[in-house]
Image (cartoon, rainbow, N blue to C red):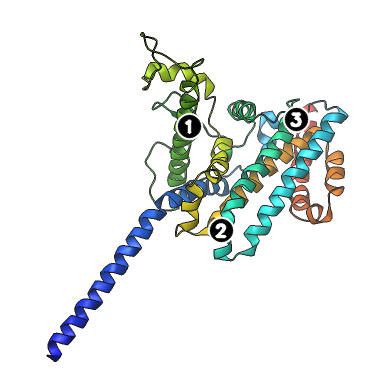
Amino acid sequence: MKNETKMLESLSLFQDIDKQEEQEQDTWKKSIPAQVFLNHFFGMHYHIQHAENAYDLDIMPQFINYKPALQTATIEEVKKLLLNCWSTEYALRSTAELGNEQYLRNALHWTFPQAYYSVLFGLRAFLATFGIVQNNNERIKRETGMLVVKGYYPFPIAYYASGTYDNFIVHRLPLAARKPGLQLATESMEAQAQIGQFLRTTRKLYARAIRQQMQSNPQTALRNKKGEILDKFTAQHWQKINWRLGYTTYFDLLERLRISTRHREIERFVEAEIDFSLFHQCLLEIVSYLNLIHESYIAKAVGLETYEMIVNQLPDYISKGFVKDRLTQKIEPLLKKTEKSQIQHAA
């Protein structure tokens, strides 16, 4: 009788273990989409952190020769956009620095859009120095794509995708063709694979969205020979809408953050078992890097003295923190080095 009782207890224990393992497997499966999303952004972060010339804008012809003539009204517009950019980055930093895992889990609801909008405002300020004062998202994406292709961005963020549906080409990521894994990148090959996959899936989603938009409107829908609205697209049909895709760049990848918050996708992320602290750190460092690149161009456009004045006029909570640090540690040395190099070449 005692042996039978022990056997039943052992059986119950094994059943509990099996049940626990099943629950863990189920949790992991549900966490895969969120983990993939984290892997993609970690790949972007890794690619920036391990690049040799990430901050060497002074060797880039587009930066060296960048000196637009700006009107006072343009500079005022730039100041407004930068304030929005920095205020949003400040909010993102405040969340990331709190560090509580449970808080960071729920904070995805607002940190996703914060990361996107901080870069968006900085990008708009950068575009304004070209005379492009624009808040239309599609126009901003097209202009950004052209700047990336023309070489205005340093190597770690200069990648982009082009091509028609199911025939996408990833540029400036020579190792992007391989299939990425489900683990965080620990080497350049995996980081590039993650970014390449992110570019392709993002471009595919955007292409499908354009098709949906076109085909739901009788005025723009493509039709067959009978005049019926097409349900399925062939390669030829995809080619006809390819011009609307433009280039897929870092900005499209960041836009996925904004899109995620509008759908049930964000709820799956919040419920997933991933490293939320790492996710926030990746987003913050990507945002910080992109904002620095845009700030460097803006500072060169308006002049270092004017840029310093813009920073000094900011509220204390911004002017004496990360914005000032980027100015003194990165932008000021960069501009002085670039100016010195230009003088030497002129001589």
Q: Quadrant of the image for the N terminus?
A: bottom left
Observer-side mark, 2 or 1, equals: 2
| Camera-nearest label, 2 or 3 | 2
> Label 2 to label 1, Cα distance in Å?
28 Å
Q: Which residue is mark 2?
A: 106
Q: Secondary structure at mark 2?
A: helix
Residue annotated with mark 3:
128
First in sequence: mark 2 or mark 3? 2
Find numbered disc 3 in the image and state the secondary structure of the residue it sits on: helix
Q: Residues within 10 Å of mark 3 (few under 14, many from 20)?
A: some
Q: Residue 343 in the image: state x and y as whole percent.
A: 80, 32
Q: How many marks?
A: 3
Is residue 170 depicted above or below 179 in this figure? above
Amino acid of disc 3: Ala
| Spatial CA span between label 2 and label 3 | 35 Å
Q: CA distance from mark 1 to mark 3?
A: 26 Å
Residue 44, image x, y percentages = 53, 45
Q: Is the C terminus in the top left, top right, bottom left or bottom right quadrant?
A: top right
**Kind of residue at badge 1:** Arg
Residue 203 is marked as 1
In the picture provided, is 275 more to the left or to the right than 139?
Answer: left
Residue for point 38% across, 14% down: 228
